[in-house]
């Protein structure tokens, strides 16, 4: 069953690449790893009471959001520059999910400014869980773009 109601994929070229390798998939690994780890460090703080874990969450969120923003810029240039990407609904779904995840990650980091310990319970932990779910959702749609729509993998755009 076609879940995204889109034309059959013939693959697309990439616009932001190093020697033909799209930059965006290289950049997203960092925000994914950092942001998906935050519920773990929040829970480690709640279980141990050690402020080290609260500071870990704070830095994971700050650096994860900044690197997510850089990755988002490379993805946005791809989206706007390559017609075959622009015309796929899944690309826009991925964009919306990614902007939501970056907004939640930034708000979570901002909430903790000045008090990384006190902000964890309850809203910090809640936003960390929500952020990790959004990372998983956006990442899944991103993978769908590459592995099913073959976005960014052919030399000449085939749409
Ligand atoms: C904010 C705007 C964003 C746009 C417009 C965007 C766009 C894209 C595009 C066009 C692709 C297909 C590969 C390519 O052409 O490079 C892609 C793949 C992907 N994106 Fe994004 N992206 C954005 C942000 C993010 C963020 C913030 C994350 C994660 C934190 C993310 C995770 C992924 C993943 C995991 C893939 C699949 C990579 C692979 O399997 O090789 N994207 N994205």
Image (tube, rainbow, N blue to C red):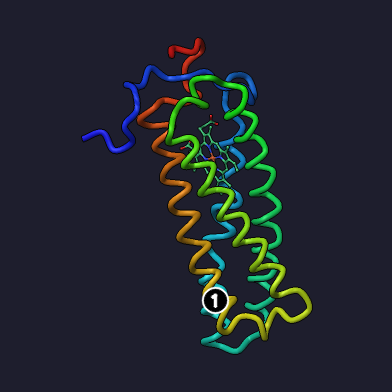
Q: Farthest residue toward the right?
A: 114
Drawn side of residue 62 relative to residue 114, left or right: left
- Where 23 sits versus 126, above or below? above
> What residue lies at 65% left-to-right and 35% top-to-bottom?
74
The one nearer the camera, 123 or 140, is 123
For the N terminus, the quadrant is top left
Task: Identify the image quadrant of residue 120.
Answer: bottom right
Asked whether mark 1 and ligand 1 are closer than 8 Å, the reply comes as no
**Residue ranking furthest to the bottom:** 49
Across and down, in percent, residue 121 comes to 58, 84
Front in this rendered view, residue 114 or 41: 114
Identity of the residue drawn at 51% across and 87% down:
47
Residue 96: give x, y in percent of width and height: 53, 46
Local secondary structure at mark 1: helix
Q: Quadrant of the C terminus?
A: top left
Question: Which of the 4 image quadrants contains residue 88?
Answer: top left
User: Residue 153: percent from the left, percent from the top?
Assistant: 47, 22
Report x, y in % for residue 39. 52, 71
Q: Quadrant of residue 42?
A: bottom right
Q: Residue at x 53, y 19 (%)?
A: 83
Residue carrying label 1: 125
Q: Residue at x 38, y 17 (%)?
A: 10
Q: Compared with residue 123, is residue 33 higher up or lower down, i.e. above or below?
A: above
């Amino acid at each position: 069953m076609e879940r995204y109601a889109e034309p059959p994929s013939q693959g697309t070229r990439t616009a932001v690449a190093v020697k033909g390798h799209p930059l965006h998939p290289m950049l997203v690994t960092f925000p994914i790893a950092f942001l998906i780890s935050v519920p773990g460090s929040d829970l480690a703080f709640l279980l141990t009471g050690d402020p080290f874990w609260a500071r870990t969450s704070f830095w994971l969120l700050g650096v994860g959001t900044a690197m997510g923003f850089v990755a988002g810029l490379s993805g946005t240039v791809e989206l706007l520059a390559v017609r075959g990407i622009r015309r796929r609904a899944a690309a826009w779904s991925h964009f919306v999910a990614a902007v939501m995840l970056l907004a939640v990650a930034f708000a979570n980091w901002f909430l903790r400014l000045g008090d990384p310990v006190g902000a964890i319970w309850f809203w910090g932990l809640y936003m960390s869980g929500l952020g990790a779910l959004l990372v998983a959702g956006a990442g899944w749609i991103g993978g769908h773009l590459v592995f099913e729509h073959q976005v960014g993998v052919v030399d000449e755009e085939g749409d």
